[in-house]
């Protein structure tokens, strides 16, 4: 398939990602009935020279990679301009069954949620690989930042544990959502999702960001109400001051790892209680979505 104009290229990539999620047998929770891990994805695009990427570096730390740095470190082509690059970002929504199961949980994740965290992320990795391969086949250089050797976890002076690339921040830049009190990204299909991205040497019109503030969709920040994710967290990691990553981490490791292994029989950590059973689980919430306690 060839794609001539930038609009063609956007539609072509959206169709490719959607096709993978809807048709590939790789999109599986790997349970006995091979249920799909994710439903219909959202796809957005942002420019490689979007100033937001430099601002992330300013906020998080000098180790945070811009799209240009990811690209040039991969291809050793320092002549490429940031404006020649596009960040392709996607949202993989959890299924209704996965969300319904995790909604009932109060301390440890449901089996479906744990499968979506472990095997679903493997689906996400496959999707990154397929997008990169497809683009390469069509003559475009592309790389998935989180599968590069440069991807690592560091300590940010301002935010503590932080990675050298954030899929959620790429999605925010690509018009796909804004951040909630619990740090999750609230998208048009809610916060119960996984996200991924690829940096490609191609021009595509950026997706319009339908928000002016990075916390616009969270009711706590926009209206001073809700805070439902606070009581959903079994670790006390979420307060009105935001999420304490170290408390979250201390619950994930080793408690959820042991739980997943002993109850579901596979290796991996998972939680996601703050992503389910909350007004922003499956949509951009409104005040009417907040149930009284
Ligand atoms: S549950 Fe409420 S306070 Fe928490 S992120 Fe969602 S909208 Fe914001
Ligand atoms: S992932 Fe779990 S432990 Fe971490 S903040 Fe969310 S609910 Fe709390």
Image (cartoon, helix red, strand yellow):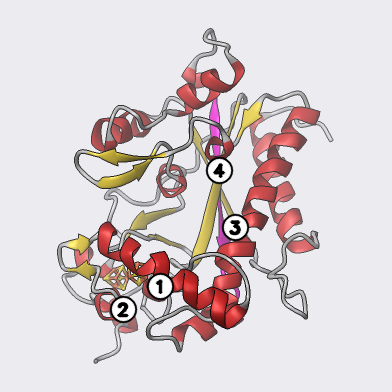
At horizontal 28% and vertical 37% (from top left) the residue drawn is 60
Task: Identify the residue at the far bottom of this view.
Answer: 293
On the rendered structure, is 27 left or right of 94? Answer: right
Indicate the position of residue 91 as horizontal and vertical percent values. 54, 56
Please identify, in this view, whether the residue under mark 3 or under mark 4 is nearer the observer. Answer: 3
Circle 1 residue: 255
Circle 2 sits in a helix, a strand or a loop, which is it? loop
Circles 4, 2 touching at the beta carbon (< 8 Å): no
Q: Is mark 2 within 8 Å of ligand 2?
A: yes
State which quadrant residue 5 falls in.
Answer: top right
Which is closer to the viewer, label 3 or label 1?
1
Name the spot of residue 45 as percent of width and height, x first.
53, 40
- Image: 111 above or below 173: below
What is the secondary structure assignment of the residue under circle 1?
helix
| Type of secondary structure dominating the magenta stretch | strand
**Snapshot quadrant of residue 42:** bottom right
Vertical placement of residue 290 versus 163, above or below = below
The nearer-to-camera label among 2 and 1 is 1
The residue that mark 2 highlights is: 234
Segment tinted magenta in the rendering: 84-95
Q: Earlier in the sequence, mark 1 or mark 4?
A: 4
The answer to which of marks 4 and 2 sits earlier in the sequence is 4
Examine the rendering and report whether any part of residue 95 can be seen.
yes
- Residue to which mark 4 is pinned: 197
Q: Neighbour class for label 2 at 10 Å: few (<14), some, many (≥20)?
A: some
Residue 67 or 269: which is nearer the viewer?
269
Q: Residues within 10 Å of mark 3 (few under 14, many from 20)?
A: some
Rounded to the nearest whole Å, what is the CA distance between mark 4 and mark 2?
30 Å
Answer whether residue 96 is visible to the viewer in this image: no
Quadrant containing ligand 2:
bottom left
Q: Check whether the beta carbons of the residues at disc 3 and disc 2 lie within 8 A of each other.
A: no
């Amino acid at each position: 398939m060839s794609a001539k104009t930038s609009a063609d290229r956007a539609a072509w990539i959206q169709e490719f990602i959607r096709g993978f999620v809807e048709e590939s047998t790789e999109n599986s929770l790997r349970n006995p009935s091979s249920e799909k891990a994710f439903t219909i994805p959202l796809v957005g695009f942002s420019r490689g020279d979007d100033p937001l990427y430099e601002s992330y570096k300013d906020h998080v730390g000098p180790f945070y990679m811009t799209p240009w740095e990811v690209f040039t470190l991969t291809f050793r082509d320092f002549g490429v301009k940031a404006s020649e690059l596009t960040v392709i970002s996607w949202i993989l929504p959890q299924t209704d069954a996965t969300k319904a199961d995790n909604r009932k949980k109060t301390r440890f994740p449901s089996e479906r949620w744990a499968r979506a965290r472990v095997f679903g992320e493997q689906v996400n990795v496959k999707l990154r690989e397929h997008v990169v391969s497809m683009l390469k086949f069509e003559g475009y250089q592309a790389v998935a930042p989180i599968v590069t050797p440069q991807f690592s976890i560091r300590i940010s002076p301002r935010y503590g544990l932080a990675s050298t690339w954030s899929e959620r921040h790429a999605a925010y830049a690509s018009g796909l959502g804004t951040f909630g009190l619990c740090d999750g990204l609230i998208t048009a299909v809610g916060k119960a999702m996984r996200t991924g991205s690829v940096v490609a040497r191609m021009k595509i019109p950026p997706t319009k960001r339908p928000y002016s503030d990075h916390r616009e969709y969270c009711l706590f920040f926009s209206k001073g109400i809700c805070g439902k994710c606070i009581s959903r967290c079994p670790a006390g990691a979420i307060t009105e001051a935001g999420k304490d990553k170290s408390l979250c981490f201390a619950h994930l490791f080793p408690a959820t790892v042991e739980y997943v292994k002993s109850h579901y029989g596979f290796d991996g950590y998972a939680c996601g209680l703050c992503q389910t059973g909350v007004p922003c689980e499956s949509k951009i919430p409104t005040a009417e979505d907040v149930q009284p306690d």
